[in-house]
Amino acid sequence: ETGVTQSPTHLIKTRGQQVTLRCSSQSGHNTVSWYQQALGQGPQFIFQYYREEENGRGNFPPRFSGLQFPNYSSELNVNALELDDSALYLCASSPAGKGLYEQYFGPGTRLTVT
Amino acid sequence: GQQLNQSPQSMFIQEGEDVSMNCTSSSIFNTWLWYKQEPGEGPVLLIALYKAGELTSNGRLTAQFGITRKDSFLNISASIPSDVGIYFCAGQLLWGGGADGLTFGKGTHLIIQP
């Protein structure tokens, strides 16, 4: 069984640019969530996708947006990058049913904004 | 936003010692999860708890869902070098319906001294 995978592993962008991060869910999982983890902190919930629609969002501005595809893979897009967007971005997938709250994380994408 | 108070922030222990850490909140959670994160990796799910009072073990790890639904603890017995890492508690709010994502604590950094 393949776990959650993310690409790229590392990324360096300049302030004001746009970035797209990608995630492939664990086999059999239909819900994807994205988190931002700043250095020394716990992950912060960005949003969640189920059946290709956003069904929950944390306290992040609209320049953070996402997509979920029919194969349950997902993208996180961030526009107008700011220095504070530098963080580890984590994707997590979860199965339907009781396991909805059991979220399984990928290795993350380390984004550095200069 | 919601916060989880996780303590202690860090622990320096000898190999073979038992470890105990906990999480508290002012809000009621319907799910408590414990994760471990190592450098350069995403969080790995250790234990999931769904019922108040539930006590669950996973090898040398034992976690409990507090009766008040506002706290949880994790114990590690007979620590070994590979237990080193950052342990996070995470909770799903009672009324969140799963779409609010997980709320994470700030982590407990476990360091094992030779």
Image (cartoon, rainbow, N blue to C red):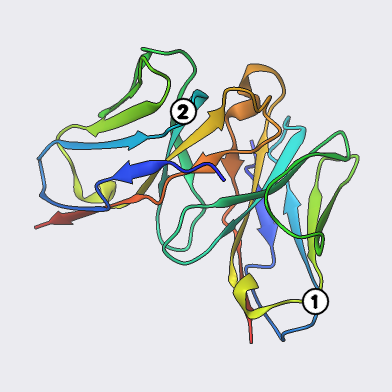
What SS does tag 1 mark?
loop
Please give left or right for residue A102 compared with residue B21 in the image.
right
In the rendered view of the protein, which quadrant contains the C terminus of chain B?
Answer: bottom left
Q: Are there few (<14), some (14-19), or many (20+) residues within 10 Å of tag 1? A: few
> Which mark is drawn over residue A80?
1
Amino acid type for the residue under numbered disc 2: Trp
Residue B100 sits above or below residue A89 on the image: above
Q: Which residue is pictured at 47% across the width and 43% down the height?
A: B3
Amino acid type for the residue under numbered disc 1: Ala
Q: Which residue is pictured at 69% across the width and 18% down the height?
A: A97
Of residues A28 and A63, the one nearer the viewer is A63
Q: In the rendering, at what x and y percent does residue A81 appear?
A: 74, 76
What SS does tag 2 mark?
strand
Of all chains, the one bearing label 1 is A
> Which mark is drawn over residue B32?
2
Of all chains, the one bearing label 2 is B
Residue A21 sits above or below residue A101 on the image: below
Of residues A4 and A110, the one nearer the viewer is A110
Q: In the rendering, at what x and y percent does residue B94 appear?
A: 57, 22
Residue B84 sits above or below residue A103 on the image: below
- Between the C-alphas of marks 1 and 2, the distance is 35 Å
Q: State the image quarter where residue B100 is shown.
A: top right
Q: Which residue is pictured at 66% across the width and 52% down the height?
A: A5
Q: Which residue is pictured at 60% across the width and 28% down the height?
A: A101
